[in-house]
Amino acid sequence: MPSDNFMKLGNAIHRSLIKVSSGKQGWDMAGMPVVKLTTMGRKSGRSRTVMLTSPIQSKNSIVLVASKGGSDSHPDWYLNLCENSIVKVETHLGTNSMNAKVVESSEREKMWSEITKDYPNYASYQEKTDRVIPIVILEMKSSSEYFDVQEESL
């Protein structure tokens, strides 16, 4: 499983690709849409940005899998949104404030089956760890609730 430094380097390169191509490239990876997720750091109180794949998207929601490549620890972005569920999400269509909700028990199992059927790499990540890999749904926020902080990359 990749180290945290390797994952941070990959994220920096990915963000650079989007920036250098003026947003024309980098919004797809391994057949999945890519999102730029910004959370509020639970310890620092500063914004933290990471590039993630999203196995399921609809008009008003985005699904994320907190796999961290099968690591025994949760990814920082997941821990951050557990502390503050308001996040900023950028896709190839634009940027929105969204609310994060961790999917629980029976709903998670149903979604997990759907996700791993289409993207079996997630099942292999689950085999590497004893932790239950969380699934998160991001839903559109009302216009009165915004994520408004200066962005810093992870």
Image: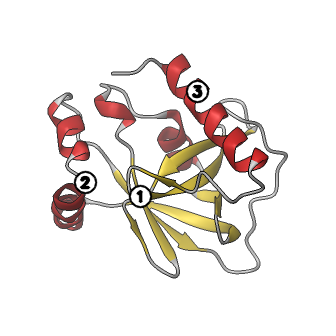
Give the residue at x 28% y 31%: 70
Badge 2 density bin: few <14, some 14–19, many ≥20, Cα 10 Å: some
Helix, strand or loop status at disc 1:
strand
Residue 89 image position (x, y, % from top left): 63, 60
Q: Is residue 15 visible?
A: yes
Q: Which residue appears at 47% of the width and 67% of the height? A: 62
Upstream in sequence: badge 3 or badge 2 = 3
Residue nearest the viewer, comparing 112 with 35 = 35
Q: Which mark is residue 7?
A: none
Where residue 71 appears, as percent x and y from the top left, is: 32, 26
Residue 74 falls in image quadrant: top left
Crowd tier of the residue under label 1, counting other residues whose Cα lies within 10 Å: few below 14, some 14–19, many 20 or above: some
Provide the residue designation for mark 2: 119
Which residue carries the number 1 mark? Answer: 32
Q: Quadrant location of the N terminus?
A: top left
Q: Tell me which corner region of the image, top left, top right, bottom left or bottom right, holds residue 41.
A: top right
